[in-house]
Image (cartoon, grey):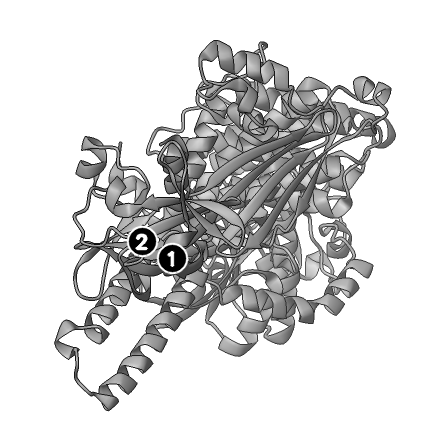
Amino acid sequence: MKKLLIVDDAAFMRLTIRNMLLKYEIEIIGEAANGAIGVEMYKELRPDVVTMDITMPEMTGIEALKAIKAFDPQAKVIMVSAMGQEGMVKEAIISGAKTFIVKPFKEEFLYQTISKVLGI
Amino acid sequence: MSNQYVNEPMLDLFIFESMQLIEQMELLIIANEKSSSYASEAINEIFRIMHTIKGSSAMMLFNTISTLAHSMEDLFFVLREDKPQNVDYSELSDLVLEGLDFIKLEIAKIRNGDEADGDASELIKSLRVFHATIKGQKSSAHDQNLSDGTDSSESCPPEKQQYYISKVRRTEITSLRNTFQATLRFDQDCGMENLRAFGVVNDLGDLAEEYYHIPEDLDHEDSVRVISEQGFTLFLKTDRSLEEIHRVLIQTFSLKDLQLIQVENSDLFNDLHKERIISLEDSAVKIPTPSGREQVANEQQEKEIQSSATQQSIISVSVAKLDQLMDLVGEMVIAEAMVTQNPDLKGLELNNFQKAARQLRKITSELQDTVMSVRMVPLAGTFQKMNRTLRDMCKKLNKEVQLQLIGQETEVDKNIIEHISDPLMHLIRNSIDHGIEMPSERETKGKPRLGTITLEAKNAGGDVLIIIRDDGEGFNKDRILAKAREKGLIQVPENGITDKEIYNLVLLPGFSTNENVTEFSGRGVGMDVVVKNIEAVGGVITADSVPGKGTTITLKIPLTLAIIDGMNIKVGDSRYTIPTTAIKESFRPKIADVIVDPDNNEMMMVRGQCFSILRLHDIYHVKTDVTEFTDGIIIMVEQDDKTLCIFADELIGQQQVVVKALPTYIRNTKKVRGLAGCTLLGDGSISLILDIAGLIGFRQSA
């Protein structure tokens, strides 16, 4: 079972992602409420893939992405973005994000993206 | 009403989180509005809140909320990035608060299972106009043109950027063996197609030496449309094979379709990209240099991780579950009493049993305390909400009032909080509307222009006192009396009425002194509702006033509703319970201390003071053998500075009792006075819980 870490400051979004993936063979091993915790949890839990919100308090998704990539260049991070964040998304791609999804997204799209990132 | 929709936990969480964020944002706005501009952290925070709400509501397909939140997000983006001067912050606050009200209303509809069908187009229009004004000031300096609000708030300024990428270790074009043309189409609705294309280019990275693509400018607004309609076409020169390039491109996310062909004629390529060689470094997105900000972030990081980590260990539980838990604990308290005070045990010497029973009682009471503490919520949230009421009122009525909050950390039961929010709001409105004078009037009276309303909470025994104090003009006694007379609210002779009693007339249903019904208060139904709400949670409300100096309204509210410490007493075959907090003392009376006045009212002299006696068997028509004072017992109780002596047969003992409401069929058929509820005793019998305030009223009116 592949392990996913969700990093998002909105509990609603974390629950949404969790619910969307319920029926798939993906284990959500952690939820972080900001970038800083996300990085810590990444180091500790070593998930196979991360969904990363961009706008978060304490440490933004971009900063967290960079920190995770610095720690593990192989890290697979999917950015969760929204309309109006094109500039950030671009920065994330340059910084090594695997890909990104745009809110609002559908369940199938989320799963397809994750499975593709994981190569399953 | 679609119930399965309402009960969905995701929706619940959406509502809960959004409301929390909105409240947080309201406070931020109100706190910042007073100063001439918003603090930069506040702008950041508001931006983030709107961003979160935008995203969440879009996920739930509440598009109106999402669009509105987006407009506000854009506005604060401009404030954050451009720091425009001369922004009308008062107008901004009005606009944004109006927007929040709209979202709140929509969320309320959603919560009730209704369609969120509000129309925010006017609001969005005003937000855009405002956006344009602040942006307009900026544009003279930076020559940026405003796009129609759908513009990307976080994207880089639309400077022309070419994504023709050439690598640092550039080799001569002619030395490259292969030229490929790739056309990629992305899944419909995958979003930000231009950036997906950018990702493709980025992924190719080292594999290709030279690129050229159509559309050329991936930052251009049109690029999204072009790519989704015509696909993304990429020319590249590389010494890799077609298979290798294919392998990379096919990895592209959200890829619907890929065409990759080798182009023989490299002239096409050369023509296209002539003179457009810009190094990757130059063309890359402007990444905000993480300077001091990141350092600070790093320093704080550790601390924040800790604080956030503790946040993580908090879970939210539905109140219904807590209610259930409380009920269960209540049942357990009864069950414990039933076991330890079982009639079968009477007269038995059971040392070990007593020991075990004591242990059980200890644990039960700890459990009960814990469950109750879980249900306790600080008043801070409710108090903070009043800031908004205050702001709106002051703005509408042109008054200047500040709100002082004292004792916000005082905790009360969750159920009680829900019952006092509306009354508080109404009382605050009353104070501003009727109490606090206009600033000019205050100045002529020698008061500070700025009026003050103090909202104070404190613990007092088993109760919480909430005091609303204003420094306005106070009640007008004559007006109150005249009004009360007119409405026929005075039953006692007027010459015997004290000032305090006059002031408390305003709490009677259907009383309103202000002839001018304003938008906010003075409809006369308000006070009625306030009193009803407070009484519903077993609270008492009193009013006091000093003419010219101000008014004080005090709400006395029990800490918790469910379980009280009670003294069980016996009258004939009936059992009654008196809340221990109300009992001053109990004693066997001497007949010499009893006085009877000409109206046949019985009084008890205690240490030189006289108190009325209430015979419980008399008022509840209970048959008992104990009618002589010397045979029974007097329990002296006090509430609201009024004292009463209750005459009963005997004391049974002290016990924690679970308060149950009187069954509705009893309440509906007859208005029983002086009873707060009933409870189950250890031996299985039912005891009636006395409402001391009610009994005192009983004695007075009798």
Discs 2, 1 touching: Cβ within 8 Å: yes
Instruction: Indicate left or right for B170 with B198 as reference.
Output: right
Q: Tell me the chain of label 2.
A: B
Instruction: Say whether residue A74 is visible.
Output: no
What amino acid is at disc 2? Phe
> Residue at label 2?
B629
Q: Nearer the viewer, residue B341 or A12?
A: B341
What amino acid is at disc 1? Pro
Q: Which mark is residue B658?
A: none
- Which residue lies at the image location 37% right of the left edge and 31% below the top edge? B599
Q: Which mark is residue B589?
A: 1
Of pointers 2 and 1, the one earlier in the residue sequence: 1
Q: Nearer the viewer, residue B136 or B350?
A: B350
Please state, as top left, top right, bottom left or bottom right, where the C terminus of chain B lies in the image.
top left
Q: Position of residue A23 (x, y in %)?
A: 28, 60
Q: Are marks 2 and 1 on the same chain?
A: yes
Describe the element under mark 2 as helix, strand or loop. Answer: loop
Q: Position of residue B465 (x, y in %)?
A: 56, 47
Please state, as top left, top right, bottom left or bottom right, where the N terminus of chain B lies in the image.
top left
Instruction: Say whether residue B136 is visible.
Output: yes
